[in-house]
Structure formats: structure tokens, C-alpha cells
Amino acid sequence: MKYQPVIGMEVHVELNTTSKMFCGCSAEFFGVAPNTNVCPVCLGMPGTLPVINRRAVEYTIMTGLALNCTIQPHNVFARKNYFYPDLPKGYQISQYELPLCLDGYVDVDPDSSGQTKRIRVRRAHLEEDTGKLTHVNNHSLVDLNRAGVPLLEIVTEADISSADEAYAYVSKLRQLVRYLGVSTGDMEKGAMRCEVNLSLTDPDTGEWGTKVEIKNLNSFRSVRNAIEYEIERQSQVLDSGGRIEQVTMGWDESRQVTVVQRTKEGDTGYRYFPEPDLPPLDLDPAWIETIKAGLPELPDAKVARYTQSFGLTLKEALVLVEDRTVAEYFDQVVSVANGAEAVTPKLISNWISGELFRLLSETGTVITAVSIQPAQFVE
């Protein structure tokens, strides 16, 4: 039987702040000696009090605006209570009932055909990250450098219906946070981590099946492969008369299979309640407008401008806007050319995506390190 996948995603984005979410410790954790960027606050010592990182709030607002969300002027931090060795306080400071960002959307184009699908964003909320566990033989090593690093969790509605759409959504999200400069989006370094909630719809009744969560998705390829595998696995279980269990699965990259990690715990298991050590966060509407006015031109707007004003094809425009620095270099060259008949935007686009990209590939460099100035490029 052919089932219709119903997929929602939760993406955690590490924010590019200098210090942690609620203390003054450095937010650097990748490649840093274990347990060096820590203090009594992020270690959860008794008597310590958190202080909100203003820059993390600003970055969250920027991202929320880019995701077409409504920014909530009144929001509250909450304690998410659970026990795990990498959570020193025994709870995580997060947001629950009153998050910073609500009701947004992202338009994706999985096959670059110009036909977009809208993925609704239910919420985007700010929280602190946990530490990191490294399992060696029969022991687990705990590194708390990452504990307390600002983390933005972006939650979609269950609008995704294929692995390709999920891949396109995550790609678009990484592109946005990189354009904004709020995160590196480097999945291999843990700066973006994805979780998938997937169920299959019965084609006869239209009812959603039991939801399964998939974790440990640390690359675009893992997102696509895990979804494709899980759709096939659940289809086989249902076709054989079996029942889907509500569990949390992990993705085994080496075996290319999902494996059961634990029985799924619902939200009520976390016993959320307002964080007593932090007052409600009330945002000045004028500050939100200032942040909005300072946003850069985003990828969709650039694509529209390049195709409508410069006559580029959709494919040509998408190649240029993939990286903000490439798009800015293109704009600079077009500005220097200043409408010269012999140096059209299309010709500039062809040279950048052809010869310049070839040189960058051969030399292993990036466009910001290129010594060819826009005026020289025009010549």
C-alpha cells in the first residue's frame, strides 16, 4: 500500500555569540580542551543566577523575522526538567508557552523548478545547549564547554511530505542563518542539528499514524537517507499487519538504518514551569523595528531581483545567491559595470559561475580572498 508521509522538523541552531546564554563564559566549544569554558553558572552550582544574553535575543529576533514569524513582545523562559549526565543543573532553561517567535513560514523549491511549497514554522524559541558526551569503551566522558551556549530551536508544522522537501527546508534554513550571520550552520561541527518527526497517513481513512522521532541527523545526506529509510520501514511494518510504536530512533550512519533509542516521552514528562530566576522578557517594539530595518537582503528577494531586473534565469540566480559573499561580489561587479552594453549582468553571472568558480575550486579559496577587484573583473 502507498502511504503518505507526514513530516515535521525540529532544527537546533547554535548562535554565533561571544559568550554563553546566561553567563559570561566563552561560547567556543569546538576544538577546545574539555571543561575549560565553564563557571559556576553553567555548571549549575547552588546560589548562582542567570543573566540573559542580549545578543542571543537579537539574533533570535533576526532569524524570526527572516522566517516571517510574529515576534512576541512578551515572552517567558521556562525550566525543562529532565535528568541526563550532560545537563548539570538537572533542567534546561528554555521557552515553552511564550516563545520569542511564532507562526512563520519558509518557501522551498526542492527541484529548483520555480514551484515552491510553503513550510509553516510553528515557533522559534531560545534556550541553552547541553554538554557533550563521548562514549569510550564502557565509560562516558562529559565535556561541559557546550553547556549554556545559546541555542535557537526552530519547529515546523507537519507540512513536509518527502525526503527531498526536508532536504530543501534544512538547506534553506542554513542559507538564511548564514546570510544573517547568526550562525555558521556547520552541521559537521554541531552548529545545526536536526530531528525529524515522521508518521504515515492511511490512504483510505486519511488518519495520521503513530509519530516516530529520529535523532542524530548531522548532515543533509543523513536527513534525506533517514527519512527515506524510515518511510520504507514503517510501510513494511504496516503492510505486514504490524503496529508502529511511538519511539525515539537514532540514525546509524555506518549501517544506514534507524535504531530504537528509547520510548518517546511526551511534553508533560518534562514538567515545564516558568524559570523563577528570570523575569518575563518584555521587548521594546522600537528595538524590534530597528533590527528589522537592519536585515540584509535575503535570498528569495535577491533571486527575484536578479531574475526580474537583470534577466537571469532562475537557475543562474540560485547559483549566485547560494552564498551571500558571491551574491555581494556579483552586485559589486554589476554596479561597477554600470549598465555598459558589452558587460551585461548575464555575462557577469556566466563568468562568475564559470571561470571564477573554477579558479576558486582549483586554488581551494573563497571569493572573499580573491584579489580580483570588481573594477578589474569588468575590464
Image (cartoon, rainbow, N blue to C red):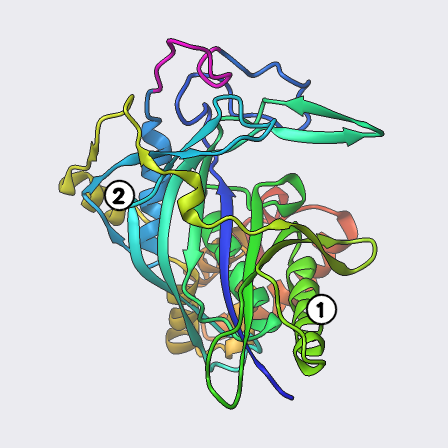
Say which of marks 1 and 2 sits in front.
1
- Up the image or down, 182 lies above or below 21; here it is below
Provide residue 259's location: percent of width, then percent of height: 73, 55
Residue closer to the observer: 200 or 20: 200
Residue at point 33%, 20% (across, down): 51
Classified by dominant secondary structure, the portion drawn in magenta counts as loop
The mark nearer the N terminus, 1 or 2, is: 1
Residue at point 46%, 25% (across, down): 18
Residue closer to the observer: 61 or 357: 61
- Up the image or down, 368 lies above or below 238; here it is above
- Decide: few, some or many residues near mark 2? Use Cα within 10 Å; few <14, some 14-19, many ≥20: some
Residue picked out by circle 1:
229
Secondary structure under the numbered disc 1 in the rendered image:
helix
Residue 291 tag number? 2
Residue at point 46%, 49% (across, down): 177
- Magenta extent: 40-50
Residue 166 tag number? none
Give amino acid for label 2.
Ile
Provide residue 209's location: percent of width, then percent of height: 53, 73
Provide residue 319's location: percent of width, then percent of height: 57, 67
Can you tell which quarter of the image residue 286 is in? Answer: top left
